[in-house]
Image (cartoon, rainbow, N blue to C red):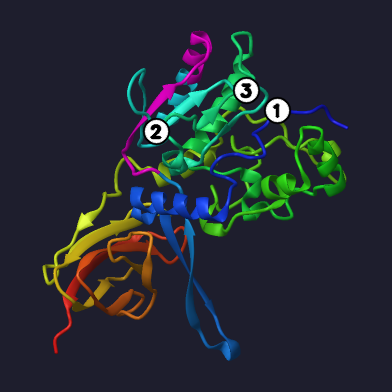
Amino acid sequence: MARLCKICSPRVPGLSGLAAARRSADEVATRERVDNTRVTVLRSGPGGQRHTRAAFEVLKLWENGRRIRCKFLDGDPVVQARVQAIAKQWEAHANLTLDFVTQGAAEIRISFAEKGFSWSTVGTDALTVPASEATMNYGWLEPSTSLREYERVVRHEFGHALGMIHEHQNPAASGQIPWDKPKVYKYYAQQGWSTADVDFNIFQTYSEESTNHSAFDATSIMQYAVPDSLTVGSFAIGWNTDFSPLDVSYMQRQYPRTGAPGVVDLVLGAARHAADLASTGEVDTYRFTLTAATTCIMNTEGSTNTVLALHGPNDPGAVLAVDDDRGQGLNGRIVRKLGAGDYWLTVKHHAPDGRGAYTIGVKARRG
């Protein structure tokens, strides 16, 4: 049996919890950023017929460009300084500012009090934690701890804090790690994990839209080490201490510095807005307001294969309708009677790696 390794707590805030708490966290996430509700169009049908349906997944990403305040609740000043310096390395890859403050409110609150466990809430789940409590903990960092261990743990936990999940729970990891399950259960039991903890934190995978990458990345900073003694045959993954190329590209795609606007306001009946899905995985977000009940036609135009989703009223997490190809060519088109209130439209490319220009507009249907 391999020596016990120090990894995230099995009960990581934001990765586990009651269904009601998860629903509350989902609401917070979609208030922070409309496109945290990602829409995937699925097509299936008997006899070659195509039926369009949609799957939804709530991510926990911060608003792009956001200043995220971080504060230490306790700990040794030497350890605090090292954690801060390494955490801020994420700023080179994401359009976010980690602002370490000593007083007042903070979204990320860091403690060292829970010895033996390191963990972090995932992205916007930090906003659901009472203001007096930690959202991140480092349970074994000391002034004498090696720089390599600081880099491994701090980069990993701040990856969670910015919205990343564990890489071995990427659905693309299914079948890639030949786990010897009885040995895995026995191994983690020595760290106080139950069978349910292991199932939830090791074997359970997320849906496609919530993953860090489109392919399994064994070199990700979010990947646990996998000892050869816990797998069938000869297979192991060592300790990752640096950002992988896919870690960097994921953060750049989710928090781009250029090419992805914030929420754009549309006006009913106004001229169409020209836009561009300039990077892979980009989701463009629009908002419009109705002062009275109106039957609206919402559509994209152009040569780009777009997926159009309607959110609201007054709740960006509520998806009212999704369309892929009902407009001209490969464009999305939604016609719906809507009451007074605020609404949002999100536009993405049908292909995960697709790009292209399009226009979007909202108008009232005549008659």
First in residue order: circle 1 vs circle 2: 1
Q: Classify the position of the C terminus by image quarter.
A: bottom left
Q: Give the residue at x 35% y 81%.
A: 326
Q: Which residue is mark 2?
A: 107
Query: Dot 3: few (<14), some (14–19), or many (≥20) neighbours within 10 Å?
Result: some
Q: Which residue is mark 3?
A: 139
For the residue labelled by badge 1, is the local secondary structure a helix, a strand or a loop? loop
The answer to whether the residue labelled 1 contacts the one labelled 2, judged by CB atoms less than 8 Å apart, is no
Distance of label 1 from label 2 (alpha carbons): 26 Å
The relative height of residue 348 versus residue 135 in the rendered view (above or below) is below
The answer to whether the residue labelled 1 contacts the one labelled 3, judged by CB atoms less than 8 Å apart, is yes
**Residue 247 location (% of width, % of height):** 52, 39
On screen, residue 46 versus residue 54, left or right, reads right
**What is the quadrant of residue 296 in the picture?**
bottom left
Instruction: Look at the image and say whether residue 214 sits in the magenta stretch.
Output: no
Q: Give the residue at x 33% y 74%.
A: 331
Depth check, mark 1 against mark 3: the one in front is 3
**Residue 145 location (% of width, % of height):** 63, 13
Instruction: Looking at the picture, tell me which residue is in the foreground, 357 or 63.
Output: 63
For the residue labelled by badge 2, is the local secondary structure a helix, a strand or a loop? loop
Q: Which residue is mark 1?
A: 6
**Residue 274 location (% of width, % of height):** 20, 61
Depth check, mark 1 against mark 2: the one in front is 2
Instruction: Looking at the picture, tell me which residue is in the foreground, 134 or 242.
Output: 134
Instruction: Report the amino acid beneath label 1.
Output: Lys
User: Bounds of the magenta span?
Assistant: 62-83
Q: Classify the position of the N terminus by image quarter.
A: top right
